[in-house]
């Protein structure tokens, strides 16, 4: 299921935004790819527990 978060964020109140667990997105690992239209981004969980999203 692909969710267009950017569009939905402008259409509903902040308290109704979807919440995604980063560990679920990475399937327990530390990397996941996220697609927005034709662009791929990499989500990385650092050893310090921070999130980094890169193109």
Image: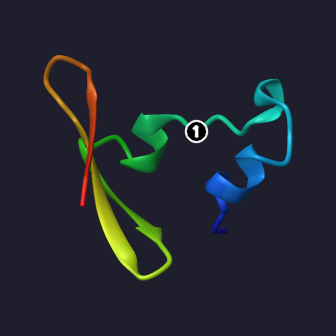
* Location of residue 55 (image quadrant): bottom left
Q: How many marks?
A: 1
Residue that label 1 marks? 20
Give the quarter of the figure containing the N terminus: bottom right
Q: In the depicted view, which residue is nearer to us: 28 or 21? A: 21
User: Toward the viewer: 23 or 50?
Assistant: 50
The residue at the point 74 percent across, 36 percent down is 17
Q: Residue furthest front?
A: 10
Graded by Cα atoms within 10 Å as few (under 14), some (14 to 19) or many (20 or more), the crowding at tag 1 reads few
Lateral position of residue 54 relative to residue 32, left or right: left
Relative to 40, does residue 8 appear above or below in the rendering?
Answer: above
Helix, strand or loop under label 1: loop
Above or below: residue 17 compared with residue 38: above
x and y percentages locating residue 54 in the rendered image: 23, 52
Q: Position of residue 44 (x, y in %)?
A: 24, 43
Where residue 19 sits in the image (x, y, percent)? 65, 34
Is residue 31 positioned above or below 37 on the image? above
């Amino acid at each position: 299921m692909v969710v267009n978060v950017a569009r939905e964020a402008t259409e509903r109140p902040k308290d109704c935004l979807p919440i995604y667990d980063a560990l679920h997105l990475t399937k327990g690992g530390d990397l996941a790819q996220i697609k927005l239209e034709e662009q791929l981004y990499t989500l990385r969980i650092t050893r310090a527990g921070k999130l980094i999203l890169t193109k």
